[in-house]
């Protein structure tokens, strides 16, 4: 991936870092009232320079590095918000591309919300892979999975 370089005196953001294809790691930058629930904000320049994320279409899974991930079907997907002058308070928390979460995220996700010093994993793998399927095809795949795993002999417990 080609990285843009900042001009003299203009330091380019160093995060997020792509560790695997469509998997990015970035420090937790803090919380902001400028973001809505299930949004993650990242400095716009950092998104454009260091990722292949498209905020208009990609939805990402967010996990704190080292914590257990929820199963895909139970997980929530986050909208990526490019932080710029329209989000000044949130942008101050992401000068080098740190992840910023909405104020109150710890209420929605008490065990999964990041804390100071945590690294955050942002994954767009599902969005990239499932984006290749149209909605009807994806629904058919899910229905088939549920049908094939249902045992008519099994009683309710």
Image (tube, rainbow, N blue to C red):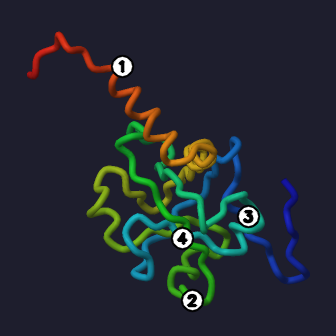
Tell which circle, 2 or 1, labels the residue nearer the N-terminal end.
2
| Residue in view at x 53 percent, y 57 percent | 59
Left or right relative to 144: residue 93:
right
Residue, disc 3: 14
154 is higher (above) or lower (below) than 115: above
Q: Residue furthest right?
A: 8
74 is higher (above) or lower (below) than 53: above
The image shows residue 103 at horizontal and vertical percentages of 36, 74
Q: Rounded to the nearest whole Å, what is the CA distance between mark 3 and mark 1?
A: 46 Å
Tell which circle, 3 or 1, labels the residue nearer the N-terminal end.
3
30 is higher (above) or lower (below) than 139: below
Q: Rounded to the nearest whole Å, what is the CA distance between mark 4 and mark 3?
A: 15 Å
The quarter of the picture where residue 92 lies is bottom right
96 is higher (above) or lower (below) than 89: above
Q: Residues within 10 Å of mark 3 (few under 14, many from 20)?
A: some
Residue, disc 1: 148
The quarter of the picture where residue 97 lies is bottom right
Tell which circle, 4 or 3, labels the residue nearer the N-terminal end.
3
Q: Rounded to the nearest whole Å, what is the CA distance between mark 2 and mark 1?
A: 48 Å
* Residue 106 numbered tag: none
Q: Mark 4 falls on what kind of element?
A: strand
Tell which circle, 4 or 1, labels the residue nearer the N-terminal end.
4
Q: Are marks 4 and 1 in contact (CB under 8 Å)?
A: no
| Residue in view at x 48 percent, y 52 percent | 62
Which residue is at the front of the view, 93 or 135? 135
Q: Nearer the viewer, mark 3 or mark 2?
A: 2
Residue, disc 4: 41
* Residue 86 numbered tag: 2
């Amino acid at each position: 991936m080609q990285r843009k370089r900042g001009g003299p005196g203009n330091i380019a953001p160093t995060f997020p870092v792509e560790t695997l294809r469509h998997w990015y790691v970035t420090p937790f930058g803090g919380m902001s009232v400028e973001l809505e629930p299930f949004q993650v904000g990242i400095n716009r320049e950092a998104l454009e320079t260091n990722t292949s994320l498209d905020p208009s279409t990609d939805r990402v899974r967010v996990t704190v590095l080292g914590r257990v991930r929820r199963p895909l079907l139970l997980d929530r997907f986050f909208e990526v918000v490019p932080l710029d002058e329209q989000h000044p308070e949130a942008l101050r928390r992401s000068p080098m591309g740190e992840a910023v979460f909405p104020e109150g995220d710890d209420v929605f996700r008490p065990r999964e919300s990041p804390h100071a010093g945590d690294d955050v994993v942002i994954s767009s793998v599902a969005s990239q892979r499932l984006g290749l399927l149209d909605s009807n095809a994806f629904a058919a795949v899910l229905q088939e999975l549920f049908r094939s795993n249902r045992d008519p002999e099994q009683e309710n417990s």
